[in-house]
Image: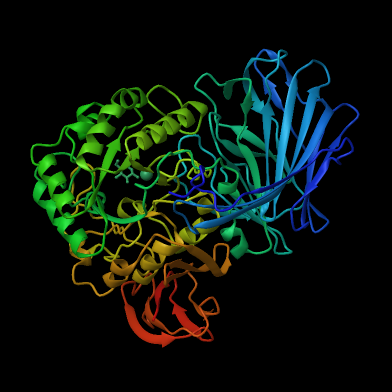
Amino acid sequence: MTACSNPEQLKKPKLTVIDRANTPLSVSSPDNKIAVLFSITESGEFRYQVQHQQQVIVKKSQLGFEFLQQPALTQFEVIARQQVSYNNSWQAVWGERKNIVEHYNELLISLKDKHSLRLLNLRVRVFNDGIGFRYEFPQQTAMQAFVITDEKTEFNIAQDMQSWWIEADYNSYEKIYQSSQLQQLKHVQTPLTMRAKSGLHLSIHEAALTDYASMSLLRKQGTLLEAELAPWADGTKVKAKVPFNTPWRTIQIAENASQLVESDLIVNLNEPNKLPDSSWIRPMKFIGIWWEIHLGVHTWQEGPRHGATTAHAMAYIDFAAQNNIQAVLFEGWNKGWEKWGTREAYVVPTDDFDLHKVANYAREKNIVIVGHNETGGNIAAYEQHVEEIFSLYNELGINVVKTGYVAEQGFANGENHHGQFAVRHYRKIVELAAKYNIMLNVHEPVKATGIRRTYPNMMTREGARGGEWNAWSEGNSADYSMILPFTRLLAGPMDYTPGIFDIDFSNFSGQRYDWSGNPQNADYRVRTTLARQLANMLVLYSPIQMAADVIENYRAHPAFDFIRQLDVDFDDSQVLAAEVGEYIYIARRSGKTWFIGLATNTQSRTAQLSLDFLKANKRYDAQLFTDAADAHWQTNPELFEIQRREVRVNDVLEVKLAAGGGAAIILQEK
Ligand code: NOJ
Ligand code: CA
């Protein structure tokens, strides 16, 4: 432990308070490129505007709320203002990079309703990579408990832009990303990413979603978007009492796609690490009894094709221990798979799964077990049993839990996956998991908003259409997965489940069944090359990263050598080149080793990688796992090559990427 009481603090942050009556109603980024300006109309409408290099990028946009049984808060007078400059750098427990600079200028504006004594504060922070603002309802007598029926925050984008989005749905993010002009979208999830003709990139999202409903964006007209909150079952949006802060509304602003991906704005707008001890939290690779179930070879439920048997589990543990994999997931080891949500479904093993034997074996081999809790959306039952579950898992060495909330129409009690009820539930589980030293991987989650800074046991989540869709649907194209780093992944890590080697599932031909138990005849497959599957392990960041294929497909496969060597505990990440939806080349460093992922959409291309990020005067051993010359996602997806050579800082690596292809490179300092 360091001497600092705050475990993430690197040095003493610098805080300057500028408190003048004439503080202007505007605030700029430390580098002065971004400015947020406020104005108030005669009638009291309070608006913000955002500029980049003196150009208006968000035109005057309204702020405020409507409530149940209370007049709206949309007409204000300004009663006080205060400006603060903050310069800090903090150390993440894990992440794309360990050291994060948190440097911003803040303006706090105290507002009073023109028609009553109600008070509302607006806090805005401007960083070099974007802005965040939130509403704060201070302690006051004029307002106590309140129910928000509509948040009136607007994002009045100054010009039409190319945009990338998935449609809003209060119970699912598992949609295909679309690209259109801003003027064509209707109602979308965040992050909503946009690119202007000038090359400026914007992405609207939110940070620190806590005890509030998640925000989507509804286009009102032209390029004017308004916040829309996921409702409670009763139709209201947020139930609260003063003092109360909303999540931050964020706009990431970048001069190119690489900078957008490198932005730390979302984590920076979250509270510091709250856990008294994070030493038990660590990034890991994992494999699991999982893909074979999605392929229809094995089943979750007990029966002749049951996947999670004691013998099968021990074979997975052996493979992990022999191959530098730290953890193993078992799905379907609990009794009552058919009865999601019951106590048995979490703590009682099936007759053919000897839980204690498997747990002891894993402990002997130093392997972490990833437990699985499929709630089926039965929140009441999960909350009732969760402490018993987590305390049992803690004793058994099940230090990671993958939770699941499959319930396409909403939770059993009628609430939505993305409403305030759900946000409270998901947070409660994060806090309880921390109490029992459990790291989380949440499927069918609410979106990531950077709470991993505050609760570093909140490792990863699904929250987009993952690789599993390839097993039982028309699947995910290479174009689709190429949009993820610039949209979904801006919010935080994703459990995409990459690393499938048997692209056409031919190794299990004749052994697959659909969910009704009939032979699977559809020609489902993975829609990238094998080398791109390796690249996805770097491009689609997750601190607990799954190598998702079955061990039979990895055993003796030369490409598995990349996964064996991969270390997902990164010190740093740099985007070498990127264009939204087209390609990304990203380099991540663990200690003295760089791991570089290169991925393209369905266009083949040649990457020219300048290695100027390497140390001068050092030699590096390079291993390149690339598409073979005639590889193609459609016709020759599994053709790959491995090359080894020595490289130095001045070298430029030329790497050919097939259509739907990619490459994974290891550069080991000698
Ligand atoms: C959907 C999840 O995304 C998947 O990973 C899991 O295997 C199934 N639900 C069953 O819980
Ligand atoms: Ca899912």
Q: Is residue 92 left or right of residue 296?
A: right
User: Where in the image, quadrant-wise, is ligand 2 located?
Assistant: top left
Residue drawn at x 32%, y 35% as measured from the top left = 436
x and y percent of residue 441 in the render? 37, 44
x and y percent of residue 464 in the render? 45, 48
Q: Is residue 669 left or right of residue 343?
A: right
* Residue 246 vertical placement versus 580 (above, below): above
* Residue 157 vertical placement versus 435 (above, below): below
Q: Quadrant of the C terminus?
A: bottom left
Query: Dividing the picture into quarters, in which one does residue 207 lie?
Result: top right
x and y percent of residue 153 in the render? 70, 35
Q: Judge by depth and name the residue closer to the eye, 566 or 505.
A: 566
x and y percent of residue 25 in the render? 84, 40
Q: Judge by depth and name the residue closer to the eye, 116 or 157.
A: 116
Query: Dividing the picture into quarters, in which one does residue 633 lie?
Result: bottom left
Task: Count how many numbered circles sit on residues in the image.
Answer: 0
Q: Judge by depth and name the residue closer to the eye, 166 or 289.
A: 289
* Residue 657 vertical placement versus 460 (above, below): below
Looking at the image, what colour scheme do you see? rainbow
Residue drawn at x 49%, y 63% as measured from the top left = 572
Q: Is residue 408 visible?
A: no
